[in-house]
Image (tube, rainbow, N blue to C red):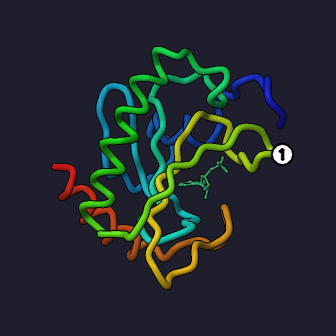
Amino acid sequence: MTLGTTYDPNNIFAKIIRGEMPAIKVFEDQDALAFMDIFPQSRGHTLVIPKKAGATNFLDADPADLSVLIGKVRRVAEGVVAALGPDGVRIMQFNGTPAGQTVFHLHFHIIPVFENEPVKRHAGEKADIAELEALAEKIRAALA
Ligand code: AMP
């Protein structure tokens, strides 16, 4: 899917927002939802998405919606950092298949980076769900 792709209301993140698919959530308010990436690139890899459907990527999002969303990304990133104490954190965002995008509902990646723990490839191995739950619990506590 290239830039300019029409929004598919049945994409996996839209289904998570509607409660039709499970997700390990760490934050939710009227504007945004944050949950654990199930193919994490690092311990604590978290995704932040707008609840509003319609934007496949950064470029077709309303700038006013983006400005709200980036505040939520910052808040969740602070929680991830407080909970897990990484040495660094990547805030990432991909637009279009050639750029690495695999889910076509706008989202930001929060990828904590730990010294001596290599960052894994994008959308690679599925995580152990119990481990994700334990990480999510710490992040939720930090965000509370
Ligand atoms: P992107 O490739 O930038 O579109 O990011 C999509 C991300 O969603 C990838 O990092 C995937 O690992 C992740 N992902 C795909 N399906 C799910 C799911 N059901 N729950 C949580 N994360 C998912």
| Residue 27 percent across, percent down from the top left | 31, 45
The residue at 70%/28% (across/down) is 8
The amino acid beneath tag 1 is Pro
Q: Is residue 78 above or below residue 13?
A: below
Question: Nearest the camera: 106 or 67?
Answer: 67
Question: Is label 1 in a helix, a strand or a loop?
Answer: helix
Q: Residue at x 24, y 55 (%)?
A: 140
The structure residue drawn at horizontal position 55% and vertical position 24%, both measured from the top left corner, is 53
Q: Position of residue 129 (x, y in %)?
A: 44, 71
Tell me if 94 is positioned left or right of 78 in this view. right
Identify the residue shown where x is 40% and y is 45%. Answer: 34
Q: Nearer the viewer, residue 20 or 133?
A: 133
Q: Answer with left or right where residue 118 lies relative to residue 27.
A: right
Which of the 4 image quadrants contains residue 74? top left
The residue identified by callout 1 is 98
Residue 41, by quadrant, is: bottom right
Q: Is residue 131 above or below residue 26?
A: below
Establish if 40 lies above or below 18. Answer: below
Screen quadrant of the N terminus: top right
Asked whether 139 or 112 is in front, the reply is 112
Counting from the top left corner in percent of width and height, residue 135 is at 33, 69
Q: Residue 112: give x, y in percent of width and height.
A: 44, 64
In the displayed structure image, the side of residue 17 where residue 61 appears, left or right: right
